[in-house]
Image (cartoon, grey):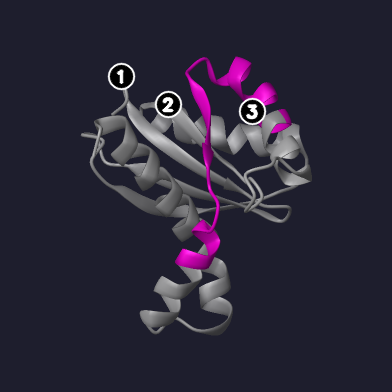
Amino acid sequence: MTEGGRALGLDLGSVRVGVALADPLGLTAQPFGILKRRDLDRDLAPLLAIVGTHEVGTIVVGYPLLLSGAAGASASDARRFVERLAPRAGIPVVLWDERLTTVQAERALREGGVRGPRRRQLVDAAAAAIMLQSWLDRSRGS
């Protein structure tokens, strides 16, 4: 659970950022939407607007480790993103292991009957929700 606000989850991709938001009690994470990636400065503005509008107290950024647990190029990108976001957000920004969340999101959407372009639009936000739920569960000690 977060101190002083909700948790916001971000699944960073090269084209889109999947966004998820926890309920006010910090029990469940729901997909919130996606933001198109442009450049870092323009990407931060809509994220900071969400933080203010939804009283976010912690931002959880997916940390895309390799299956071996090593940090590759995508993990380095996530660290750089956090280094730029944290000072502007003024709230805790944490990295959280997101290994296999996109695979889980794809499977859940496929099993739910979501197909084609619609699934591609939803998968990033669904992956962000899975990652954020993992963080919420660990934060509560579940």
Q: What amino acid type should be assigned to the residue bearing mark 1?
A: Glu
Amino acid at dot 3: Val
Q: Residues within 10 Å of mark 2 (few under 14, many from 20)?
A: many
For residue 3, above or below residue 119: above
Q: Which residue is mark 2?
A: 58
Can residue 54 be seen by looking at this rendering?
Answer: no
Under circle 3, the secondary element is helix
Crowding at label 1, few (<14), some or many (≥20) Cα neighbours within 10 Å?
few
Which is nearer the N-term, disc 3 or disc 2?
2
Point 53% across, 58% down: residue: 100
Query: Do the CB atoms of the residues marked 1 and 3 lie less than 8 Å apart?
Result: no
Asked whether, in this view, residue 134 is left or right of residue 69, the answer is left
Whichever of labels 1 and 3 marks the residue nearer the N terminus, that label is 1
**Residue 116 lies in magenta, yes or no?**
no
Helix or strand or loop: what does disc 1 sit on? loop
- Image: magenta residue range: 80-104
Tell which residue pokes out farthest to the front in this image. 68
User: In the figure, is residue 63 to the left or right of 74?
Assistant: left
Label 3 to label 2, Cα distance in Å? Answer: 12 Å
Position above or below: 71 against 6: below
Residue 9 can be seen in this image = yes
Q: Which residue is mark 3?
A: 82
Assess whether mark 1 and mark 2 are in contact (beta carbons under 8 angstroms): yes
Residue pointed to by mark 1: 3
Provide residue 121's location: percent of width, then percent of height.
55, 68
The residue lying at 28 percent from left, 29 percent from top is 1
